[in-house]
Image (cartoon, helix red, strand yellow):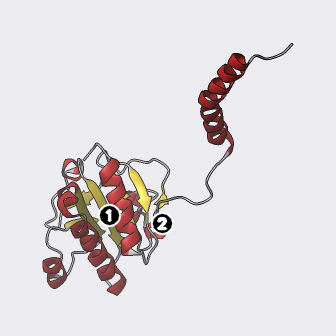
Amino acid sequence: MAVSKSQLKLLLVLVIFIAPVVLATLAYQFWRPEALSNYGELIEPAEFKPAGLSTASGEALDAAVLRGKWLLVLVQQGECDPACAQNLYLMRQVRLATGKEQQRLDRLLLSDRPLPEALAKEHAGLRQARYAAAGELGAYLSEAAAGGRIHLIDPLGRFVLRYPPRADGSKMLKDVQRLLKYSRIG
């Protein structure tokens, strides 16, 4: 049985339109990229529950003030050492570098003691909360897990990313900008 010229053209047109769909389906099923585009470590979805936190003045912290914005969180035990000061600086610079989107991003320091006055003035707008016991902070923010890391929490109160102890600010900024660009919340 011979294939006519018109049947061959029809078959070719079908292949041209069906092949990309088949190839895309196969790639989706069997190919996984080796490198991810985010710098921070993705965290399994868990909710940030700020129970047992108090403001710098000793009043119970209202969890509602922490919702609705992206939140950069740093946990510090004891006095704010140079690594803590560097992380506070990094959080401030990342927020400022987001430009017009900076109102969508907030910063929070969780500490067992207040920040020194000079450092607090340097980081105006930084929210501070005190905790009584590190165990109350949850799995991701307990001292052993946090260890000088900055965490990013979404506007709905879920952990998204965790950065290494000495994070690279430009890579962190790239992550935050990408999330702010594609996010419809916060």
The image's mark for residue 12 is: none
Q: Position of residue 44 (x, y in %)?
A: 50, 50
Query: Is 160 above or below relative to 9?
Result: below
Q: Amino acid at mark 1?
A: Val
Q: Please, which residue is most extreme toward the top here?
A: 1
Badge 2 amino acid:
Ala
State the image quarter where residue 109 is shown.
Answer: bottom left
Can residue 62 be seen at all in this image of the molecule?
yes
Residue annotated with mark 1:
73
| Residue count near mark 1 (Cα–Cα under 10 Å), binned few <14, some 14–19, many ≥20 | many
Tag 1 and tag 2, C-beta contact below 8 Å: no
Would you say 70 lies left or right of 41 here?
left
Q: Is residue 14 above or below residue 165?
A: above
Q: Residue furthest bottom?
A: 82
Q: Position of residue 114 (x, y in %)?
A: 21, 75
Residue 133 visible? The answer is no
SS of the residue under disc 2: helix
Position in image of residue 172 (x %, y %): 38, 67
Looking at the rendered image, the quarter that the N terminus falls into is top right
Residue at the extreme right of the image, as rendered: 1
First of labels 1, 2 by sequence position: 1
Q: Which mark is residue 145?
A: 2
Residue at image position (59%, 28%) is: 17
List x then y, in percent, for residue 156. 31, 44
Q: Residue at x 14, y 72 (%)?
A: 124
